[in-house]
């Protein structure tokens, strides 16, 4: 009786004990957890792979991927090599910090034999790029030699120059190594290196939201899914999705599925690294699935039922098989229990975040329970277009798609019916605009179309406005100010086989470089009989008092300090045509030489006689001496005069004859003096030989001529102490040191 009574008492306790175990189990199984917690279990996985090609000669090339024709991200340094980066959604699945994501096995690179063809194509590409960079670097070097820190935008151009030097050096090195690899006849080895980074967003105790980074290590791969190991324990503040409470497949028909993650476009955006994941509807306006691979799939109970991989849903059993392939069920269960206990008693602050942005401002997300928000996803038509996505009180809220009536499409995040957070807009022309929206406005972002990319400020019509940078093929680059999609204001442009344009832009065209005049520049004058004859009066020149005191009245010049500059060089008119001589030439040039001023003679070209006749007349009259500045040819014909002599081809032929004759006699390249109007109308059609000669441009105003030049005549009405009346004021394109180098190198021999 006593024994039976004891058994009876035990039976009384068994029922309540089993109930105590079953009720919590049922509670955990059927009570929907808050969606906020499930979203916090999500993370983003970056898989970066780099290949190395090592030759027998000891050279190594790094690249991110290979196709049948080219290598991508080629570099000679591992640190500077572009990685083949794939971004996927993922989620924590254990207290040990394991992460499940969707990453298929990387395609094997081509065999060594195919690499011969690929390297040949790379050599051709690098040769073409090397040629482009060489031309652009020459223009940047020309700018550096003819400008100083006092010039507007000088420091910006020098920064660009350093970037181009690095690109040029890298390209040249890659080209040489590629040539040696080709010569090795396939004797090289290819190795692949893969690294993983796990990024997750979570709030701390004070409510601040930060982005944290963890290194990942691949531990298992199966059926397009991957299991990563992070730090060996679940990061602080981060929950995980349980794989042990998976609901049967028939519990979750497609109509009841909800996807936790981000759209793939948001994952690929470089400026969206701090965006929070959201609950996303699977079908958009066109019926396609836009959820990123690696996104978790939950049912009406808030339980994990699958994962998106390769654009389709892999059910929960695929996730379970991946986990148990790495560690058996009992070991995973014991490990989770042990780690949970340790975590409960020994809490540690997370490592320093890799970004401290307030992610809640970047993207609003659903924080209510699934059962209470499921009906808020749907399709709605407004006056502006048709929307599909999450709704709150009939307005877009969270992630959604909008197809506008004019055909434009927006996919991204919303708040109270306005675009808020990361979003991407595609218009009917194929232009895409992406960035972080605020109150339905994108003030700065990226615009891409074809091979062009703009990054910078935008206006309400999503056109470049303010400061921004546009880059395109063949090395084109513009960085500077914009106004409603056109270049307006200060900017820097670098183009193929064109000078560096650093200055003022108006209505999308380069207007010129705004100069700043200081005593550090090299100033000079050119004179003729008009500095001696004013009306009927005759005046001499006081050569000992020569100082430039006024830079003329053309243009609103920007001057630092007082205008009281020494005359560093002087050109004196000697002859015109074949019969006119300057009666003051001999005395003036002798006085200039006596004062130690760099001197040169010039000839005024006539369209009525041949270039050879004029050259002989000039040389006989001017008698250039050793050490003088190169002779100058003043070319100022009118259109009717050019037509009368037989057209521009005839004119250039006679000009070249004069230049060749004087060059042969003096042993140096003469200088060609022309106006800016002549440059714009005729100089572009001149024979290639004519472009060998230094140019002297006459352009009056505040803007420097935008062609390669040696001298610039900036004013015809300057003032010089020691000379009566107006004087032509000129500027050497370079520093005092560079002028002395030019003076010695280009002097009459």
Image (cartoon, rainbow, N blue to C red):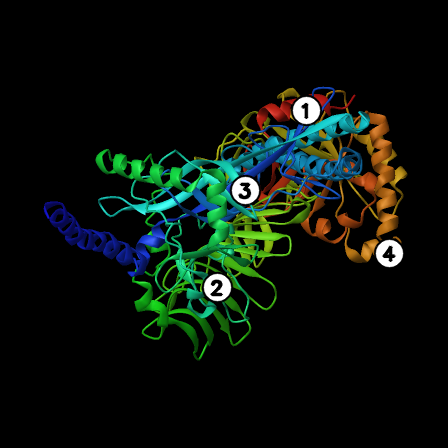
Q: Which of marks 4 and 3 is in front?
A: 3
Inter-mark Cα distance, 3 to 2 = 32 Å
Closer to the chain start, of discs 4 and 1, is: 4
Q: Which of marks 1 and 2 is in front?
A: 2
From the viewer's side, name the closer residue of 528 and 142.
142
Please give the name of the residue rendered at 24% of the width and 54% of the height, measured from the top-left corner: 24
Q: Name the residue under label 2.
A: 411
Closer to the chain start, of discs 4 and 2, is: 2
Q: Where is residue 424 in the image (x, y as percent from the top left)?
A: 49, 60
- Mark 3 crowdedness (10 Å alpha carbons): few <14, some 14-19, many ≥20: many
Q: Where is residue 722 in the image (x, y as percent from the top left)?
A: 55, 32
Mark linked to residue 221: 3
- Regarding residue 38, the answer to whether it shows in the image is yes
Inter-mark Cα distance, 1 to 3 = 72 Å
Query: Marks 2 and 1: in contact by CB < 8 Å?
Result: no
Q: Mark 1 points at which residue?
A: 743
Closer to the chain start, of discs 3 and 2, is: 3
Mark linked to residue 644: 4
Q: Note whether 119 is above or below 300 in the view shown.
A: above
Q: Is mark 3 on a helix, strand or loop?
A: strand
Inter-mark Cα distance, 4 to 1 = 38 Å
- Regarding residue 151, the answer to whether it shows in the image is no
Q: Nearer the viewer, mark 4 or mark 1?
A: 1
Q: Is mark 2 on a helix, strand or loop?
A: strand
Query: Marks 1 and 4: in contact by CB < 8 Å?
Result: no
Closer to the chain start, of discs 1 and 3, is: 3
Mark linked to residue 594: none
Please give the name of the residue rendered at 30% of the width and 68% of the height, measured from the top-left corner: 372
Q: Nearer the viewer, mark 4 or mark 2?
A: 2
The picture quadrant where one finds residue 532 is top right
């Amino acid at each position: 009786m006593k024994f039976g009574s004891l058994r009876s008492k035990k039976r009384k306790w068994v029922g309540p004990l089993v109930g105590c175990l079953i009720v919590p189990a049922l509670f955990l199984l059927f009570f929907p957890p808050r969606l906020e917690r499930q979203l916090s279990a999500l993370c983003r996985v970056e898989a970066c792979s780099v290949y190395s090609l090592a030759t027998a000669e000891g050279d190594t090339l790094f690249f991110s991927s290979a196709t049948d024709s080219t290598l991508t991200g080629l570099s000679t340094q591992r640190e500077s090599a572009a990685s083949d980066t794939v971004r996927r959604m993922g989620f924590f699945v254990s207290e040990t910090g394991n992460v499940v994501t969707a990453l298929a096995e990387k395609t094997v690179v081509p065999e060594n034999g195919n690499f011969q063809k690929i390297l040949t194509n790379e050599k051709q590409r690098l040769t073409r790029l090397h040629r482009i960079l060489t031309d652009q670097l020459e223009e940047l070097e020309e700018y550096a030699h003819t400008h100083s820190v006092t010039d507007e935008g000088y420091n910006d151009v020098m920064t660009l120059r350093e970037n181009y030097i690095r690109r040029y050096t890298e390209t040249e090195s890659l080209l040489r190594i590629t040539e040696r690899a080709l010569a090795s006849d396939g004797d090289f080895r290819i190795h692949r290196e893969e690294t993983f980074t796990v990024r997750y967003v979570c709030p701390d105790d004070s409510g601040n939201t930060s982005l944290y980074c963890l290194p990942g290590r691949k531990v298992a791969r199966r059926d397009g899914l991957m299991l990563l190991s992070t730090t060996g324990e679940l990061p602080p503040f981060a929950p995980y999705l349980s794989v042990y409470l998976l609901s049967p497949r028939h519990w979750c028909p497609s109509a009841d599925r909800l996807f936790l993650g981000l759209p793939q476009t948001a994952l690929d955006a470089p400026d969206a690294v701090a965006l929070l994941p959201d609950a996303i509807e699977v079908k958009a306006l066109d019926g396609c699935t836009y959820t990123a691979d690696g996104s978790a799939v939950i049912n009406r109970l808030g339980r994990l039922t699958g994962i998106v991989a390769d654009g389709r849903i892999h059910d929960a059993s695929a996730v379970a098989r991946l986990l148990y392939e790495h560690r058996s069920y009992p070991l995973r269960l014991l490990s989770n229990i042990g780690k949970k206990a340790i975590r409960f008693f020994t809490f540690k602050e997370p490592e320093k975040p890799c970004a401290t942005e307030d992610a809640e401002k970047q993207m609003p997300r659903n924080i209510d329970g699934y059962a209470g928000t499921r009906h808020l996803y749907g399709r709605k038509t407004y006056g502006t277009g048709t929307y599909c996505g999450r709704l709150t009180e009939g307005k877009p809220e969270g992630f959604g798609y909008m197809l506008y009536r004019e055909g434009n499409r927006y996919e991204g995040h919303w708040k109270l019916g306005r675009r808020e957070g990361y979003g991407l807009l595609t218009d009917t022309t194929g232009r895409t605009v992406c960035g972080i929206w605020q109150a339905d406005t994108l003030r700065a972002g990226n615009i891409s179309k074809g091979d062009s990319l703009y990054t910078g400020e935008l206006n309400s019509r999503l056109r470049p406005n303010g400061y921004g940078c546009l880059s395109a093929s063949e090395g084109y680059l513009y960085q500077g100010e914009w106004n409603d999609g056109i270049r307006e204001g200060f900017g820097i442009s670098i183009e193929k086989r064109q000078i560096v344009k650093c200055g003022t832009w108006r209505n999308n065209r380069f207007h010129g470089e705004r100069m700043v005049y200081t005593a550090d520049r090299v100033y000079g004058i050119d004179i003729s009989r008009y500095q001696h004859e004013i009306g009927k009066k005759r005046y001499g020149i006081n050569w000992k008092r020569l100082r430039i005191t006024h830079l003329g009245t053309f243009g609103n010049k920007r001057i630092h300090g007082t205008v009281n500059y020494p005359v560093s060089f002087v050109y004196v008119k000697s002859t015109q045509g074949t019969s006119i001589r300057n009666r003051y030439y001999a005395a003036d040039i002798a006085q200039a030489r006596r004062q130690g001023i760099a001197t040169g003679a010039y000839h005024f070209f006539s369209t009525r006689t041949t270039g050879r006749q004029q050259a002989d007349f000039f040389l006989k009259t001017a008698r250039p001496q050793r050490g003088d500045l190169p002779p100058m040819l003043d070319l100022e014909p009118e259109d009717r005069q050019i037509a009368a002599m037989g057209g521009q081809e005839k004119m250039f032929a006679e000009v070249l004859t004069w230049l060749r004759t004087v060059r042969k006699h003096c042993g140096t390249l003469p200088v060609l003096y022309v106006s800016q109007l002549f440059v714009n109308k005729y100089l572009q059609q001149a024979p290639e030989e004519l472009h060998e000669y230094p140019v002297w441009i006459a352009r009056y105003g505040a803007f420097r001529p935008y062609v390669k030049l040696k001298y610039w005549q900036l004013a015809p009405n300057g003032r010089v102490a020691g000379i009566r009346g107006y004087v032509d004021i000129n500027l050497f394109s370079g520093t005092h040191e560079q002028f002395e180098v030019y003076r010695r190198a280009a002097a009459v021999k």
